[in-house]
Image (tube, helix red, strand yellow):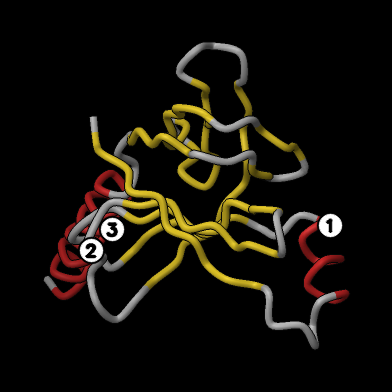
Amino acid sequence: MKRQAFSLVSLLSLLLVTGSAIAQTSNLRANVPFNFTAGEKTLPAGAYTIGAISGAPQMLLLQAKDGTTRMMVASNAAENHKPANKTKLVFNRYRDQYFLAEIWEEGAARGRQLQKSSREKELAKELASDLTRRQVEVVASLY
């Protein structure tokens, strides 16, 4: 009896986790007004769609709306104490270079964080004493 109860609790926990993971994989759209780097690739300004790849929620697919760019980037789970107040892309800015850093969905306390590229790490180290690193948010929408 204890074994069955434990199995039932385990199954329910798994379903809750799976449900949370599914909720984290919404597709979104954003119009990025500047060139930016995602992973190791620099992308032009423009309209993009971003979504998790089915079966691998840590992998994100970025696609330019005009079809010229399509790439996959690895991400990690990110968590915040407060739910996001809007659906957004967060970029780290170093002088005039932008790096896609985080993706958040309105109302969710969990989002995705992209791994820093070698170029971003290099810039961060180079500019460690310079306070020109800022975060820039671009509002996105779900679809």
Residue pointed to by mark 1: 118
Which residue is located at x 47 percent, y 58 percent? 90
Compared with 34, 68 (above or below) is above
| Residues marked 3 and 2 touching at CB (< 8 Å) | yes
Which residue is located at x 17 percent, y 67 percent? 9
**Mark 3, mark 1: which one is toward the viewer?**
1
Residue pointed to by mark 2: 13
State how far apart marks 3 and 1 are (Cα). Answer: 32 Å
Label 3 or label 1, whichever comes before in sequence order: 3
Helix, strand or loop status at disc 3? helix
Q: Quadrant of residue 49?
A: top left
**Mark 1, mark 2: which one is toward the viewer?**
1
Which residue is located at x 62 percent, y 46 percent? 74
Which residue is located at x 33 percent, y 64 percent? 110
Task: Quadrant for the C terminus, please.
Answer: top left
Q: Quadrant of residue 4?
A: bottom left
Q: Give how far across and how far down residue 36 sits, in percent.
A: 64, 43
Q: Give me the disc on residue 17.
A: 3
- Given residues 137 and 111, the one toward you in this image is 137
Label 1 or label 2, whichever comes before in sequence order: 2
User: What amino acid type is highlighted by mark number 1?
Assistant: Ser
How dense is the environment of label 2, judged by Cα within 10 Å: few (below 14), some, or many (20 and up)? few
State how far apart marks 1 and 2 are (Cα). Answer: 38 Å
